[in-house]
Image: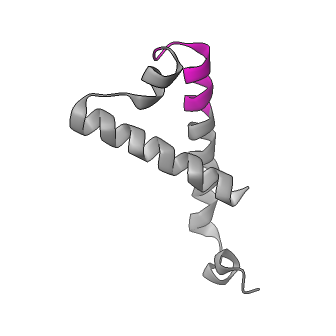
Amino acid sequence: MDTVALTLVIIGALNWGLIGFFGFDLVASLFGGPNAVLSRIVYSLVGLAGLWSLTFLFRDSRELRGNK
């Protein structure tokens, strides 16, 4: 689950970078506009992944590396 969440967070960060630097929303252009159902699903999944990733801040660093 952590890997999926991190992947989605990276996708979201890259999309926001494209919006910030070039005014280009890759997710919207791939899935039919910012209000299209598929775009909203992707945006929602990225948001949920961001919330999940907050838990990384509160975990023991050894747990994150797999050294329990």
Where does the image place residue 47, in percent across and percent down from the top left? Answer: 57, 38
Name the residue at 63% across, 25% down: 41
In this rendered view, identify the residue nearer to me: 23 or 60: 23
Q: Quadrant of residue 26?
A: top left
Where does the image place residue 43, in percent across and percent down from the top left? Answer: 55, 30
Where does the image place residue 5, in percent across and percent down from the top left? Answer: 63, 51
For the magenta stretch, what is the residue range?
33-44
Name the residue at 57% across, 46% down: 8
Name the residue at 61% across, 46% down: 49
Looking at this view, name the residue that lies furthest to the front. Answer: 30
Looking at this view, name the residue that lies furthest to the bottom. Answer: 67
Q: Is residue 6 above or below residue 48?
A: below
Residue 38, magenta (yes or no):
yes
Main SS, magenta region, reads helix
Q: Quadrant of residue 48?
A: top right
Residue 12, magenta (yes or no):
no
In this rendered view, identify the residue nearer to me: 67 or 21: 21
Q: Quadrant of residue 14?
A: top left
Looking at this view, name the residue that lies furthest to the left. Answer: 21
Left or right: 20 in relation to 65: left
Q: Is residue 60 above or below residue 20?
A: below
In this rendered view, identify the residue nearer to me: 14 or 64: 14
Left or right: 32 in relation to 65: left
